[in-house]
């Protein structure tokens, strides 16, 4: 059996985020037992744009619900448009009602 890389583990978690919900880089890192590796989760999300089939990287934001990775989605508005298409309200690059939208893999999985 092949051992999964850290990036592959991140992608497996991201694939489980339900539509209309979002999580943070840090929440994924913590779930994977690498609490101080939120930045590495961010690098994985940046690298995920080359995956096929694609994963919902737009559902991963910073710990405050800010769209900190939006520059990696082409025109800068794509991440927001993808989240809004799922019913998530964004104002000034921040998810509104973050506490209700936040999906915590440690509590759910």
Image: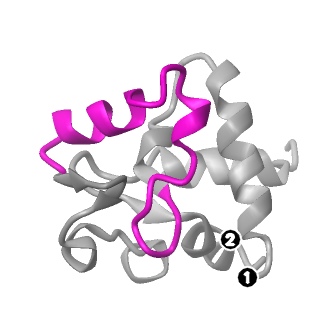
Q: What stretch is highlighted in magenta?
A: 61-88
Crowd band around label 2 with a 10 angstrom C-alpha radius: few (<14), some (14–19), many (20+): many
In the rendering, at what x and y percent does residue 41 appear?
A: 71, 57
What residue is at 37 percent from the left and 75 percent from the top?
108
In the rendering, at what x and y percent does residue 42 appear?
A: 69, 53
| Residue corresponding to mark 1 | 35
Residue 83 falls inside the magenta stretch: yes
Which colour assignment does the render follow? Answer: one colour
What residue is at 49 percent from the left and 80 percent from the top?
106
Element marked by disc 2 = helix
Height in image: 59 above or below 40?
above
What residue is at 16 percent from the left and 53 percent from the top?
89
Quadrant location, the C terminus: bottom left
Numbered label tally? 2
| Residue corresponding to mark 2 | 29
Q: Say whether residue 58 is left or right of residue 54.
A: left
Height in image: 94 above or below 34?
above
Q: Do the residues labelled 2 and 1 touch (CB within 8 Å)?
A: yes
In the rendering, at what x and y percent does residue 86 appear?
A: 18, 40
Crowd band around label 1 with a 10 angstrom C-alpha radius: few (<14), some (14–19), many (20+): few
Which of these two is toward me, 11 or 62? 62
In the rendering, at what x and y percent does residue 46 appear?
A: 69, 38
Height in image: 37 above or below 73?
below
- Looking at the image, the residue that sits furthest to the left is 87
Q: Say whether residue 23 is left or right of residue 72.
A: left
* Quarter residue 34 falls in: bottom right
Quadrant location, the N terminus: top right
């Amino acid at each position: 059996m092949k051992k999964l890389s850290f990036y592959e583990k991140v992608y497996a978690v991201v694939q489980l985020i339900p539509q209309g919900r979002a999580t943070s880089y840090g929440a994924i890192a913590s779930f994977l037992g690498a609490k101080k590796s939120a930045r590495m989760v961010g690098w994985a999300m940046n690298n995920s744009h080359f995956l096929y089939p694609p994963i919902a990287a737009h559902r991963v934001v910073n710990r405050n619900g800010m769209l900190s990775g939006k520059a990696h989605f082409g025109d800068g508005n794509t991440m927001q448009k993808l989240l809004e298409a799922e019913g998530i309200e964004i104002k000034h690059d921040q998810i509104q009602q973050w506490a209700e939208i936040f999906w915590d893999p440690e509590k759910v999985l």
